[in-house]
Each structure stands twice: as structure tokens, then as C-alpha cells.
Image (spheres, rainbow, N blue to C red):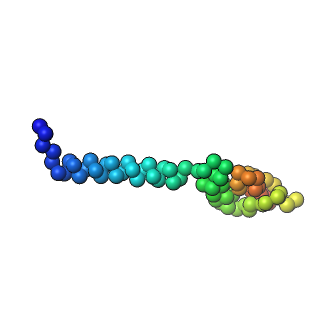
């Protein structure tokens, strides 16, 4: 009853290691309040996919705002159709 196989002991350690790695990965990807670098990066990428550009202050007169590039107010601008 009290005998534990070495293979079971190794698999239990591997599972604990996976839980630890998952927790560290989750904490690494968790954005810092006020920074939002992951969210801003995704917004910039989405803007580039739509063949648009990020403007610091505002869009040019021949462009329209279709979204945002960051949480701090950069605008995603695309040429008017």
C-alpha cells in the first residue's frame, strides 16, 4: 500500500513543473496596470493588417479614424474611400 513506483513519482513532479511553468507564463503575459503593452501591440498589429497607419495626434484630412493603436490615444487612420 505504501509503495510508490518511481515512474509515478516522476510524472507527479513533471505535472507540478508544468503547473509552475503555466503560472509563470500567465504572470509574464499579465499586463501591468497603466501600461497595457500587450493590448497596445495587438491594436497596432490589427491596424497594420487593415492597411492603415497609426497617427500620434490625429488623422489627415483625407483619412478617417477606424480605431485606436494604443490606450493612450493614438489613432488608427485609413484613407477615405
Locate the N terminus by quadrant.
Answer: top left
Locate the C terminus by quadrant.
Answer: bottom right
> Is residue 39 among the parts visible in the rendering?
no
Residue 60 position (above or below residue 9): below
Determine the residue positioned at 48% across, 50% down: 26
Q: State left or right for residue 76 relative to residue 3.
A: right
Residue 9: x and y in percent read 21, 49
**Circle count:** 0
Determine the residue positioned at 51% across, 54% down: 28
Determine the residue positioned at 75% across, 56% down: 74
Q: State left or right for residue 43 relative to residue 1.
A: right
> Is residue 13 among the parts visible in the rendering?
yes
Viewer-proximal residue among 72 and 68: 72
Residue 68: x and y in percent read 73, 52
Q: State left or right for residue 11 relative to residue 48.
A: left
Residue 48 position (above or below residue 15): below
Residue 35: x and y in percent read 65, 53
Q: Quadrant of residue 69?
A: bottom right
Amino acid at each position: 500500500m505504501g509503495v510508490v513506483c518511481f515512474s509515478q513519482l516522476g510524472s507527479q513532479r513533471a505535472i507540478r513543473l508544468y503547473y509552475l511553468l503555466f503560472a509563470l507564463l500567465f504572470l509574464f503575459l499579465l499586463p501591468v496596470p497603466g501600461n497595457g503593452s500587450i493590448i497596445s501591440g495587438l491594436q497596432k498589429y490589427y491596424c497594420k493588417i487593415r492597411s492603415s497607419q497609426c497617427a500620434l495626434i490625429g488623422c489627415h484630412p483625407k483619412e478617417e479614424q477606424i480605431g485606436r493603436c494604443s490606450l493612450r490615444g493614438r489613432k488608427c487612420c485609413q484613407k477615405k474611400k
